[in-house]
Image (cartoon, rainbow, N blue to C red):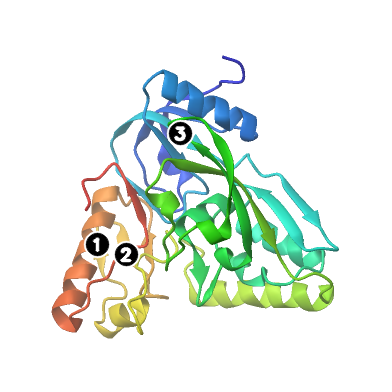
Amino acid sequence: MKNITFKEKINLSNYTTIKVGGFAEYFSKPNNADEFINLINWARLNNQRCRIIGAGSNLLINNIFLKGLTICTKKMHSIKIESHSGIVVAEAGVMLPTMSNILAKKGLQGGEWTVGIPGTVGGAICMNAGSKKLSLANNLLSVRVIDTKTLKISEIEKKDINFQYRFSPFQQNNLMILSAKMQFEPKGNIEQLLETTKKNLKQKTDTQPYHLPSFGSVFKNPTNNYAGKLIEELGLKGFKIGDAEISTMHGNFIVNNSSANSKDILDLITVIQQKVLQKKGIFLEPEVRMIGFDYP
């Protein structure tokens, strides 16, 4: 089969933002949608399990040998922009901070908030990632996907996607995101947009531990509350298990001080959940996606 290139026994800790992960049996970084589709086809024909990672943020991979094919989409970073209409077509691997800066330079408004999210377009749609009440779903027109069971490629309109808080059906179905079509507001003031984007990034780096490996936010915010606030109120900032620590900057961040492993981090997540449940009566649901665990 043409255009199939993968490596074997690759350490996935190099492909996650928290710098933790096991080894992938087969690993590939396709350059475009065609290569991606060929890899999905190869996995299907060879009865191999297939998992997708983007920027590896919001992702905890167990320190084990992971059978099957792991595909990293970061090289699928083509982006096409129509400045006059505000229509943007981005491949799944386009990084949100990159897109945010490009939008501002083109005078397109509505993507300034994405500058501080260390994920990809595909990952952000799959997880329905967001900041406060904003999410990429607000700007989405349609998604181009491949069904891993049938290899059928289709375009799904936003109205047919049931987005919920930090959830999309792509977390449960057989559809893999190839690209997304979005619309942003054209004819914005470029200088102003660049300034807002810069301020948004500064606000994130001032209040969140960008200088250390982390997931981004660990837990979803409960209704009418904030996970970080609940954790901070229990005095848990700075609490450690091994080299995994609840950030002293922000309660909803776990950082890897140098050599944390997946057990340290999962144990820390569990301790936080138990303490918040005991003291506040609220169960914190992880936003982090977990691979290679028996986690419910």
Taking the view exactly as shown, the residue that stands out farthest to the top is 1
In-front residue for pair 160/216: 160
Q: Tell me the kind of residue under disc 3.
A: Thr
Please report the residue visible at 58 percent of the width from the left and 41 percent of the height from the top: 154
Residue 10 can be seen, yes or no: yes
The label nearer to you, 1 versus 2, is 1
Number of numbered discs on residues: 3
Q: CA distance from mark 3 to mark 2?
A: 37 Å
Please report the residue visible at 32 percent of the width from the left and 64 percent of the height from the top: 245
- x and y percent of residue 283 in the render? 22, 72
| In the image: residue 249, left or right of residue 97 | left
The numbered disc on residue 268 is 1
Q: Quadrant of residue 234?
A: bottom left
Which residue in the protein does label 3 denote?
148
Q: Tell me the kind of residue under disc 2.
A: Glu
Please tell me whether mark 3 sits on a helix, a strand or a loop.
loop
Please tell me whether mark 1 sits on a helix, a strand or a loop.
helix
